[in-house]
Image (spheres, helix red, strand yellow):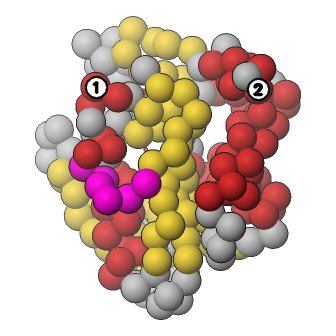
Amino acid sequence: ECKLQLVRDHIRPYQDFPKKGILFRDICPILKDPAALTAVIDLFEEEVRRNYQTVELIVGLDARGFLFGPLLAQRLGVGFILVRKKGKLPGTTLSVEYNLEYGKAEVEIQEDAVAPGQKVLLIDDLLATGGTLFAACELMKKQQAEVLGCMVVIELKELNGKDKLKPQSIFSLVQY
Ligand code: 5GP
């Protein structure tokens, strides 16, 4: 489809970023081109209307989930909430720790961000190992929210993030 091709054409690979041996997929060109950004949100919206009609909240992951999430939420007429890295949110927060290649990280939400039973859809730019989305799903479970699924622009298939996130459903636009 031509919208998908437009998205694909606006993902720029960078060899050896942020360190040697990593091929980084940069989504900045998507944001710079209004047609490509519209295509991303159109495709996400179509998927929600097909498969997630009961979504009540979009949950964006720090930081690039914040670029796409609010646009999708507005299209759908639902709210947007933030899953942030530790220490960024005021008030009472809940957190979940997760492992990085070296060391640990923590994601947080505001305690009153989501109510028990609310149906949420998580969004980020890219799925790699799935560690980040897994931690965000754990946060949602802590709050007894119902995770309908996760959406990303890009999935790196060889890292098996989908397996880590099972049984959550993962929707991606572009796969490598
Ligand atoms: P994971 O937790 O699935 O291993 O890593 C996914 C997280 O790392 C996402 O929040 C994503 O923004 C970031 N990330 C890892 N690799 C890349 C990449 O190549 N490109 C972009 N844009 N983000 C990446």
What secondary structure characterizes most of the magenta part? loop
Closest to the observer: 114 or 3? 3
Q: Image height check: is 136 above or below 6?
A: below
**Ligand 1 visible in quadrant:** top left
Which amino acid lies under the numbered mark 1 shown in the image of this protein? Glu
Q: Is residue 17 left or right of residue 35?
A: left
Magenta-colored stretch includes residue 157: no
Disc 2 secondary structure class: helix
CA gap, disc 1 and disc 2: 25 Å
Closest to the observer: 117 or 135? 117
At x 27%, y 36%, the residue is 160
Q: Residues within 10 Å of mark 2 (few under 14, many from 20)?
A: some
Q: Image height check: is 22 above or below 42?
A: above
Quarter residue 158 falls in: top left
Closest to the observer: 135 or 155? 155
At x 57%, y 15%, the residue is 12
**Residue beneath disc 1:** 158
Q: Which residues are drawn in magenta?
A: 164-169
Which amino acid lies under the numbered mark 2 shown in the image of this protein? Lys
Image spot of residue 138 (x, y percent):
31, 70
Magenta-colored stretch includes residue 165: yes
Disc 1 secondary structure class: helix
Q: Which of the two discs, 1 and 2, labels the residue nearer the N terminus?
A: 2
At x 68%, y 67%, the residue is 53
Residue at far top of view? 15
Q: Residues within 10 Å of mark 1 (few under 14, many from 20)?
A: few
Image spot of residue 165 (x, y percent):
31, 53
Q: Image height check: is 155 above or below 142?
A: above
For the C terminus, the image quarter is top left
**Residue beneath disc 2:** 3
Camera sees residue 131: no
